[in-house]
Image (tube, helix red, strand yellow):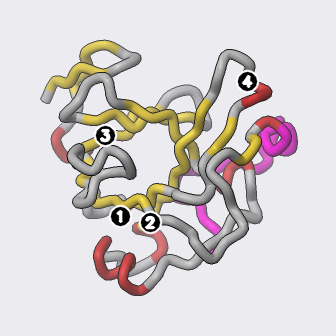
Amino acid sequence: MFIETKYLGNMEIPAEKIIFFPQGLFAFEDKHHYVLIEQEHPLWHLQSIEESQLAFLVLNPFLFKPDYEFRLSAADQAELEIKKPEELAVFCITAIPGDIKKATVNLLAPLVINISLKKGKQIVLYQQNYNTKHQLWPEMQTVRGGEHYASPNTQKK
C-alpha cells in the first residue's frame, strides 16, 4: 500500500507493518492506524496512515535511559494480548526543536506495542516519577559511542 508521509513523501508500506491503536493516541483518539518508519538510529517516525500530516518522532527509551522501567498492568497486557516480553516494544514521543540540546522526550506516556499482533496503546505511568518533557541531551551524552544502543524491543524487566 502507498501512503503519503509528513516528512518522507510517498512510500510503499507493506500492509502487515500497520500498527492498530484501538484508542488512538492522546489528543488524536480518532486516528488508529500508524506505521513505524526507521530513520537514523535511534530515531523512528510513527506515521499516521489516516492523516499524512500526523507523524511523531519516537525512540526506544531504553537506549538512552537504561534505568527506565515500569510495569505493564494486567489489563494492558490483556488488551494488547501480550503473552511474553519479547512481543513488546516500547517507544516514547520526542520533540526536537532547532537546538538539539533542548530536545525532550515524553517518558510519562510511552507507546507500548505488541509487535507480533501490530497492536498498540499509549499508557500513562501515574505511579512513576517521569514527566512529559524529560531533557534528552544529557542522557544522550551517556550513550555516545553506542554502548546502550539496542533493538526497539529492548526493555528492562
Q: Point out the tag, 1 or 4, that comes first from the N-terminus.
A: 4
The x, y position of residue 105, in whole percent, is 64, 44
Segment colored magenta: 138-157
Q: Which mark is residue 88?
A: 2
Residue that label 3 marks: 35
Nearer to us of marks 2 and 4 is 4
Q: Point out the tag, 1 or 2, that comes first from the N-terminus.
A: 2
Q: Are marks 2 and 4 in contact (CB under 8 Å)?
A: no
Q: Are marks 1 and 4 in contact (CB under 8 Å)?
A: no
Q: Amino acid at mark 3?
A: Val
On whether residue 156 falls in the magenta region, the answer is yes
Closer to the camera, 99 or 143? 99
Closer to the camera, 65 or 24? 24
Q: CA distance from mark 1 to mark 2?
A: 5 Å
Q: Are marks 1 and 2 in contact (CB under 8 Å)?
A: yes
Residue that label 1 marks: 114
Q: Point out the tag, 3 or 4, that comes first from the N-terminus.
A: 3
Residue that label 4 marks: 100
Closer to the camera, 15 or 110? 110
Toward the bottom, the furthest residue is: 74
- Left or right, residue 75 beside residue 42: left
